[in-house]
Image (tube, rainbow, N blue to C red):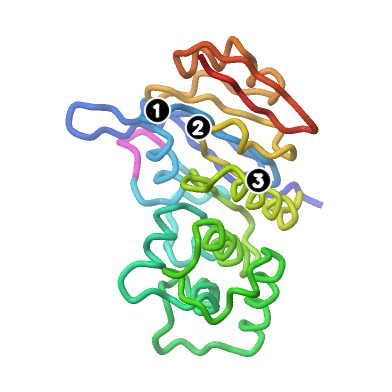
Amino acid sequence: MSDPLPFLDIADATVQRGQRRLVDGLNLSVPAGQHVAILGPNGSGKSTLVNLVMQQIRPLFGGRVALWEREHWDLFELRRQLGYVSPALQGDLAGEEPLEVMEAVVSAFFAARGLWHQQVTDAMRAEAHEALARSSADHLIGRTMDTLSTGEARRVLIARALVHRPKALLLDEACAGLDPAARRAFLQDLRQVIGPEVTLIVVTHHIDEILPEIDRVVLMTAGRLIADGPKSQMLTDARLSDLFGIAARVETRDGWYAAIYG
């Protein structure tokens, strides 16, 4: 049996806005099925990296960004293969004409915001209900996204991201706006629904959002990847102090990491 295609291959990718390079000569490869965290301070280029993965932007000539060995995707097709969770997506679903929770999840089958003339099958609704149940969010059916707490809305986003059983899941600062209790509940729910068959990339600047299941950590600053390796070697006092420019002390407990700064 042949090996699965690698999920992500970024080679010599540079993105420039005006005279400023948002990322510069980026190289990153993620095998299918691997769980990875991208860690860096605000302004380090993480959002640009996410946009490259999501095919929202392209690198300058000479750079390459391929997902499953394909450089050019129909975005609707890609969204069926790659689940995505972010505060921006939550804002979109809860914005003008907010979606009802079931509608928000079912519409993911069509890589769309909401439902218009799409033919929704009983099987799709059953899959959506199951995804909401697995995300501890089925009790929210009937409510609109703008009435949910941030923690409730993120559970719905997990269900939306996973309802069509994508090959990969990308979390972009997915815990932003959550209080400590809601953050831990969200992360514990996430642990229950991901498996080794799903590639996971978590983009964050908080090490306490790095799940115990994540073994590889990539450190990023000033548009460059500066270190890449096992979690235990990346999440050290010295490395985090250099990365964030402030003294850091790392603590671990039951596979979770935390840092005290200053």
Q: Secondary structure at mark 2?
A: loop
Q: For this view, does 165 lie left or right of residue 22?
A: right
Residue drawn at x 65%, y 45% is 184
**Mark 1 highlights which residue?**
44
Q: Position of residue 87 (x, y in %)?
A: 44, 53
Residue 81: tell me if it is visible.
no
Q: Earlier in the sequence, mark 1 or mark 3?
A: 1
Residue drawn at x 64%, y 36% is 210
**Residue 86 vs residue 31, the one in the foreground:** 86
- Front: mark 2 or 1: 2
Q: Amino acid at mark 3?
A: Arg
Around disc 1, counting alpha carbons within 10 Å, would you say few (fewer than 14), some (14 to 19), or many (20 or more)? many
Q: Position of residue 151 (x, y in %)?
A: 55, 56
**Mark 3 highlights which residue?**
184
Residue 196: tell me if it is visible.
yes
Q: Are marks 2 and 1 in contact (CB under 8 Å)?
A: yes
Above or below 125: residue 187: above
Magenta-drawn stretch, dominant element (helix, strand or loop): loop
Q: Earlier in the sequence, mark 3 or mark 2?
A: 3
Above or below 177: residue 157: below
Residue segment shown in magenta: 58-64
Cα gap from disc 3 to disc 2, whole angstroms: 16 Å
**Any magenta on residue 94?**
no
**Mark 2 highlights which residue?**
205
Q: Amino acid at mark 2?
A: His
Q: Position of residue 203 (x, y in %)?
A: 52, 39
Residue drawn at x 34%, y 44% is 58
Q: Secondary structure at mark 3?
A: helix
Above or below 82: residue 66: above
Q: Secondary structure at mark 1?
A: loop
- Front: mark 1 or 3: 3
